[in-house]
Amino acid sequence: MTGQRGRDVLIKISDGTVPESFVTLAGIRTSEIELNARLVDSTAADSEGGWRELIAGAGVKTARVRGQGVFKDAASDAHMRSVFFAGQIARWQLVVPGLGTLEGPLQITELKWAGEHDGEATFSTELQSAGALTFTAAP
C-alpha cells in the first residue's frame, strides 16, 4: 500500500434522512480514529508455564474519534452542534483512504471552540462509540 494523504481521512455525520446520506464535517484539518479491544484475562494457577491466558473475543470494543478544524460550512456545523446539545447518538462514517470505512452510532463527548484575535475560529470534537460499528474494506 502506498502512502495516503491525511486530508483524505473523513469524518461524516448522517443527515438523518431516509435513504440515509452522510455529510462531511466541513473544515476538518486533522482527524484521528482509535479502535480498542479490552483483554479478558483467564490466567489461573494451572496456566501452562505461568503464561497469561486470554479469552478470545470476550473484551469490550470501543472506538474514539477526534477531529480539529475551522468553520467553513454552516449547515454541517449547525447539525453537529444540535446533535451535541440534544445528547443524541448519531450515525457516523469514518473514511480512511486505502483501508476502508467504519460506520455506526457514535456520541459527541467533547466539542470545543477557540480563536485568536488575528486568526480563524477553530473547533475540535471527540466522538465515542455507542454501539456496534461495521467495517467495509476499500475497493
Image (cartoon, rainbow, N blue to C red):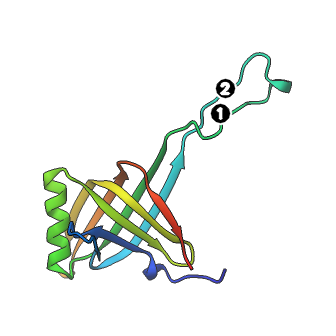
Asked whether 56 or 62 is in front, the reply is 56
- Residue 44 in the image: above or below residue 129: above
- The span from disc 1 to disc 2 (Cα, nearest Å) is 6 Å
Asked whether 74 or 68 is in front, the reply is 74
Residue 116: tell me if it is visible.
no
Q: Earlier in the sequence, mark 1 or mark 2?
A: 2
Q: Which residue is tagged 1?
A: 55
Amino acid type at image mark 2? Ser
Q: Which residue is tagged 2?
A: 42
Residue positioned 64% across, 29% down in the render: 41
Which quadrant would the C terminus be assigned to in this image? bottom right
Residue 69 position, x and y percent, is: 30, 74
Amino acid type at image mark 1? Ile
Label 1 residue SS:
loop
In which image quadrant can residue 13 be found?
bottom left
Q: Residue furthest top?
A: 45
Asked whether 117 or 32 is in front, the reply is 32
Q: How many other residues sit within 10 Å of disc 2, few (<14), some (14-19) or many (≥20)?
A: few
- Residue 75 in the image: above or below residue 130: below
Residue 135 position, x and y percent, is: 50, 63
Q: Is residue 109 left or right of residue 31?
A: left
Q: Is residue 58 left or right of residue 119?
A: right
Question: Is the C-beta separation of discs 1 and 2 under 8 Å?
Answer: yes
Residue positioned 28% across, 79% down in the render: 27
